[in-house]
């Protein structure tokens, strides 16, 4: 009897506040975070990926075109999913339709994909890519921080939101082309009072940056450049999705 009551209590929150599946947005089956049928069709990034940024590549390639052409400041990173139409909708609901809870499901799926890399990187801190203040006010949460929080909970690596911040100067970014954005990003971030956290005594630390999407990598690179200038030795990144094309700056 006691066991039955305990089982029942576990599903009460689901009955009172039904969870939505982050991939079809319908009510998820009781006790599950997503529909089993949706989980089967997720666009996971396979094993054949760029050794630097984790973008899917041809089996003959070690690095993607972008990583061959561009100097990267981050050491290595990866994503869980390709940014296809399904994931584009999921991220849109997560960021722009108030489905903050999707971030917890996506963050724990990202952890499952990347746990071997996380163990190998041996990082001291997880840092979310910071959001513009205006955007934070409008949305009410930084989507990168929701993902970072979940990665931190699963890995046991502490998360800090006071180490890396936005410098208020990238408002006009939307109208720039890719090259313009990259130029414009220089100096877009700053390391604050948490600076000491980056170097534990004489051994500079390793950091994992977390965000929702990696596109051109310009944002991630500028974060990594800023962190390394402040004393971080290694900078890795984890994102839920990875895709080509336009850099998403929010
Ligand atoms: Zn579903
Ligand atoms: Zn790459």
Image: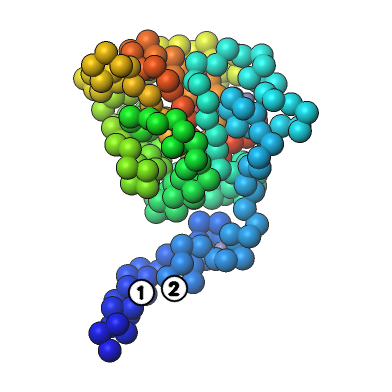
Please state the quadrant of the image where ligand 2 appears.
top right
Q: Is residue 168 left or right of residue 181?
A: left
Residue at 43%, 34% (x, y): give it. 210
Residue at 28%, 24% (x, y): give it. 163
Residue 11 is marked as 1
Residue 30 is marked as 2
Q: Is residue 58 left or right of residue 220?
A: right
Residue 23 is marked as none
Vertical placement of residue 106 versus 172, above or below:
below
Residue 46 lies, in percent from the top left, at 66, 42
Task: Kindly tell me whether residue 136 is visible in this rendering.
Answer: no
Residue at 30%, 20% (x, y): give it. 198
The answer to the question of whether label 1 and label 2 lie on touching residues, with beta carbons closer than 8 A, is: yes
Q: Crowdedness of circle 1 by 10 Å Cα count: few (<14), some, many (20+)?
A: some
Task: Kindly tell me whether residue 175 is visible in this rendering.
Answer: yes
**Lower sequence index among marks 1 and 2:** 1
Vertical placement of residue 43 versus 116, above or below:
below
Residue 107 lies, in percent from the top left, at 44, 46
Q: Crowdedness of circle 2 by 10 Å Cα count: few (<14), some, many (20+)?
A: some
Secondary structure at numbered mark 2: loop
Q: Quadrant of the N terminus?
A: bottom left
Residue at 42%, 70% (x, y): give it. 31
Vertical placement of residue 19 versus 218, above or below:
below
């Amino acid at each position: 009897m006691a066991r039955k009551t305990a089982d029942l209590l576990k599903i009460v929150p689901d009955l009172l506040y039904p969870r939505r599946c982050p991939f079809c947005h319908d009510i998820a089956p009781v006790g599950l975070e997503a529909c089993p049928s949706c989980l089967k069709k997720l666009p996971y990034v396979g094993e054949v990926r760029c050794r630097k940024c984790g973008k899917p590549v041809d089996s003959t390639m070690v690095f993607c075109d972008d990583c061959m052409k561009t100097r990267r400041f981050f050491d290595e990173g990866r994503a869980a999913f390709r940014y296809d139409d399904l994931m584009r909708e999921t991220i849109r609901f997560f960021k722009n339709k108030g489905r903050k809870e999707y971030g917890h499901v996506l963050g724990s799926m990202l952890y499952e994909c990347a746990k071997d890399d996380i163990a190998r990187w041996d990082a001291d801190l997880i840092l979310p890519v910071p959001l513009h203040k205006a955007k934070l006010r409008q949305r009410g949460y930084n989507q990168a921080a929701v993902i970072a929080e979940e990665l931190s909970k699963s890995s046991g690596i502490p998360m800090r939101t006071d180490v890396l911040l936005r410098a208020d100067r990238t408002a006009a970014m939307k109208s720039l082309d890719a090259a313009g954005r990259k130029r414009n990003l220089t100096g877009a971030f700053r390391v604050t009072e948490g600076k000491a956290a980056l170097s534990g005594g004489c051994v500079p630390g390793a950091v994992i940056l977390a965000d929702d999407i990696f596109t051109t990598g310009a944002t991630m690179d500028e974060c990594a450049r800023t962190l390394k200038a402040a004393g971080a030795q290694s900078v890795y990144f984890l994102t839920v999705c990875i895709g080509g094309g336009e850099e998403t700056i929010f």
